[in-house]
């Protein structure tokens, strides 16, 4: 009964927040219709899981707004055979969406307790093509490179060079770049003749903290 209730909320979220705002990738929309977002938020906020906003997940971190998850995923142009790196596992929700759309997903989180909760949930929901790793994702994941796609779900002061180095040719990187409190979504495509950069919507993400990001919680 409750399951049906959340499913209705999810279908309405996809129609009103995603399709009405112009998102078109059929596979992304279908994944957003399937992944049970209410299981990725804390119990007290389940009722608000499909609201048009980010929500707190503890440790000062957030699960991103559904629109932002879908928008960033659409920009990756996933066809199903990609090896993807996600930086910033958080709740694991974005990872679950990626898992339905790509061959394999490496997701990196710097806070051990958050990574551990996300890993347990992803395993229990049988997202089996996912590997959760605790490390500083601002330097990428050199031991598993190259990646067809890299998605960064925390805001960086500038684009970390290791991400470009770890992209395969024709690979796509999607990352919020800007100040601590406001960023712009950037997409990089690595081609055999160089880098193509385009910018999209304004956004607000928690900071990417690490060697190639912000140095600490208070560095701005
Ligand atoms: N993708 C997440 C989801 O679906 O719930 C939302 C991620 S939240 C907006 C950003 C996450 O990035 C936080 O959990 C934060 O701890 C993590 N983070 C920040 N800097 C990081 C770094 N250098 N390496 C890995 N994770 C990092």
Image: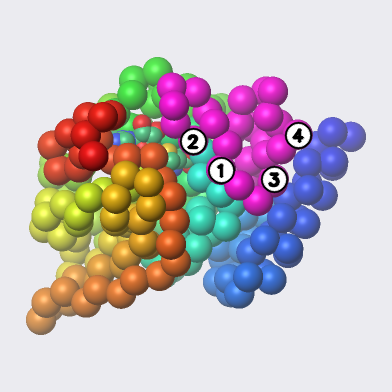
Circle nearer the N terminus (2, 3): 3
Residue sitting at x 32%, y 40%: 207
Circle nearer the N terminus (2, 4): 4
The span from disc 3 to disc 1 (Cα, nearest Å) is: 10 Å
Magenta segment boundaries in residue numbering: 35-62
Q: Is mark 2 within 8 Å of ligand 1?
A: yes
Q: For ligand 1, give the image quadrant.
A: top left
Q: Nearer the viewer, residue 142 or 21?
A: 21
Q: Residues within 10 Å of mark 4 (few under 14, many from 20)?
A: few
Asked whether residue 88 is in view, the answer is no
* Residue 5, position as x, y percentages in the image: 84, 41
Q: What residue is disc 3 on? A: 50
Q: What residue is disc 1 on? A: 54
Q: What residue is disc 2 on? A: 62
Residue sitting at x 20%, y 42%: 213
Q: Is mark 1 within 8 Å of ligand 1?
A: yes
**Tag 2, which secondary structure?**
strand
């Amino acid at each position: 009964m409750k399951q049906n209730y959340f499913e209705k909320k999810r279908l309405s979220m996809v129609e009103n927040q995603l399709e009405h705002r112009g998102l078109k990738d059929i596979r992304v929309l279908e994944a957003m219709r399937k992944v049970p977002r209410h299981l990725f938020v804390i119990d007290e906020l389940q009722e608000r899981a499909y609201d048009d906003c980010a929500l707190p997940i503890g440790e000062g971190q957030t699960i991103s707004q559904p629109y932002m998850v879908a928008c960033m995923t659409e920009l990756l142009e996933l066809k199903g055979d990609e090896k993807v790196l996600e930086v910033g596992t958080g709740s694991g929700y974005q990872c679950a969406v990626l898992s339905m759309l790509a061959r394999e997903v490496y997701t990196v989180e710097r806070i051990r307790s958050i990574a551990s909760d996300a890993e347990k949930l992803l395993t229990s929901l049988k997202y089996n093509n996912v590997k959760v790793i605790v490390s500083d994702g601002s330097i990428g994941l050199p031991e598993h490179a190259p990646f067809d796609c890299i998605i960064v779900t925390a805001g960086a002061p500038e684009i970390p060079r290791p991400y470009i180095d770890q992209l395969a040719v024709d690979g796509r990187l999607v990352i919020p770049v800007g100040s601590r409190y406001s960023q712009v979504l950037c997409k990089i495509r690595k081609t055999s003749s160089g880098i193509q950069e385009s910018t999209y919507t304004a956004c607000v993400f928690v900071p990417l903290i690490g060697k190639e990001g912000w140095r600490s919680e208070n560095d701005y």
